[in-house]
Image: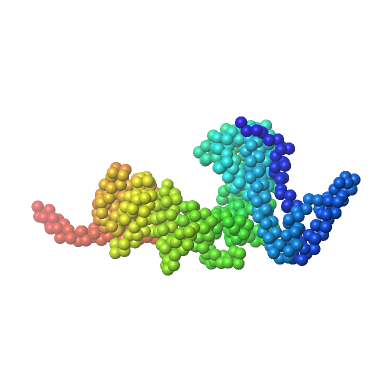
Amino acid sequence: MRTSLTRSQINPIIQARLPLLNDYKISDYIPLASTITNLGLLALKGISSLYSSSPSYSHTWLNGASHLNILRSCLLLVPVIGNIAVYLYDKRELDRCKEGDEKLTLKAMQNSSDSVLDRLYAYSHLSNMDHTCSYYGRWVSEELEQKDLRLFLQDLFQLLQKEPHNPEALGAASIAIACIWEEERNQFLPLLQKAGYDSWEALATQAATLNPKNAAAQTNASFWLNDTPKSLSYCVNAVRLNPNSPWYWNNLKEALEQNNLQTTDIDGQSISITDCLVKAIELRPKRAQSWVALGDYSQPIPIAIFGELFTREQAYIRALNLDPDHADTWRKLGQLLRHKDMSYPLKIGGREIHHAYECHIQSVELDPDNELNWTKLLDSTRNNNSSLPFPSFQIGGKQINSQAELTVKALELHPNSHLLWNDLGITLFFFPQTVIVNQQTITSRHTCYAKSIELEPNNAVVWDNLGKAIWRSPQTVLIHGKPITSARECFAKAVSLDPKDAVFRNNLEKASSWAQNRYRALSETLSPFRTWMSRKTVNQ
């Protein structure tokens, strides 16, 4: 049972600051000026010690000097060296103070779990910090069990039933519900309706309306409204209220992309997607996800940050140097490097990368449950030329010596992946062989494409692949028990699923003209026979 903290207990925790912060002076960083001011302060310190025994004497300067940090002042008597040392120390203490403030606030929220009002009070302070949503989400995912979160939400909704327009309760509920697993979110719909709201979007927008000065409430409303113009306006409000949060700038960038816009207006200033990316990185340069967002943006020219030009490739590399265990970033970098001439190795996270497929190996090792990582690894190792050797490597302690072995390994983990069955069909086209997949013997690529279509019947690419396989090597395949013998039928299905694809239409036209020419040739071949039969019938 956790002990409940009262507001009077939480407030000092949230407001806690290092005493040193109150002593910062601009003169401390200026040579000679710091020497003069600190000589004066040390003199006042000596005077204050003389009068400390007299309770009747009081002076503001002397009271302040009594709390003087003597070591700091003595260090500042040394020009330049003392200024540099104090600056570095102050910067470290400021960062530590900021981080400690966040942790103390989170601790207050956790320890006060028996009182929803106390936690709401802590939440109201946390929501005014620079990284509200991120830290609230981190608290939910790492520090607080999902079970405790559900109990917290139940308390919130009970409070909302009594006070449906409580700003703090609305703000906390709209963020907390976003941290619940999606499949569990529907369990709270009855409580949501009892509180008078018919959707999560309505809850979030009401929270944003009643908290017009709360940046967290604004950006959370944009999350629920997703890719609507209203979502963009909420993101703009969040940035306007708190321009020092990298999360809000990233959210604004995503809102612009979702609404197919390149710029928006904030207080008369035109803000582009590039501006959002640069601002997010400048505010938190050691946040890997901000660099990933820069890499994801398909800007044709390098972007200047901190006086240095960064390409998409360099952005991903910077992100991986900050967080080398992020599988998606490895995969994205591998895709960029696939068609690049790797004349020199890339140094990332203490390792050297010589080929694009090495990035995909890292993504598979880090996240083998993501089938997309496997498909991209297969793409990067597929030479489409039997004269080029397969780059042997190990995955999960198993040696992989061929494209087929790699595909089979992937299908062992993802037997219901239509993408991987299509990949196996492509592999068997370039390297015909018999393979065993989960105790099933596969002898032709036709079987692989048919299996892929059974798992996902609306993939136009696989229908086109099956059509080409039947075209080159006529064979009847069964798809859900229905026999498919015509390549033209497969091409027609591909065109019906994606009528704008020129390749699919061209294949269908070729198959149709081939069928017509074959029918015409057959008719010309049988024409004399038909004439003879007709004459014979007349004579009879």
- x, y (%) of residue 114? 64, 32
* Camera-nearest residue between 279 and 115: 115
* Camera-nearest residue between 324 and 494: 324
Residue appearing at x 31%, y 50% in the figure: 448
Q: Is 217 on the left or on the right of 76, as rendered?
A: left
Q: Is 146 on the left or on the right of 407, as rendered?
A: right
Give the answer, above or below, for where 346 lies relative to 108.
below
* Camera-nearest residue between 41 and 244: 41
- x, y (%) of residue 299? 53, 63
- x, y (%) of residue 442? 27, 49
Q: Quadrant of residue 28?
A: bottom right
Residue appearing at x 73%, y 65% in the figure: 79
Residue appearing at x 20%, y 61% in the figure: 524
* Camera-nearest residue between 202 and 28: 28
| One can see residue 519 in this view | yes
Residue appearing at x 33%, y 60% in the figure: 390
Q: Residue furthest left?
A: 540
Q: Quadrant of residue 260?
A: bottom right
- x, y (%) of residue 138? 58, 45
Q: Residue furthest bottom?
A: 343
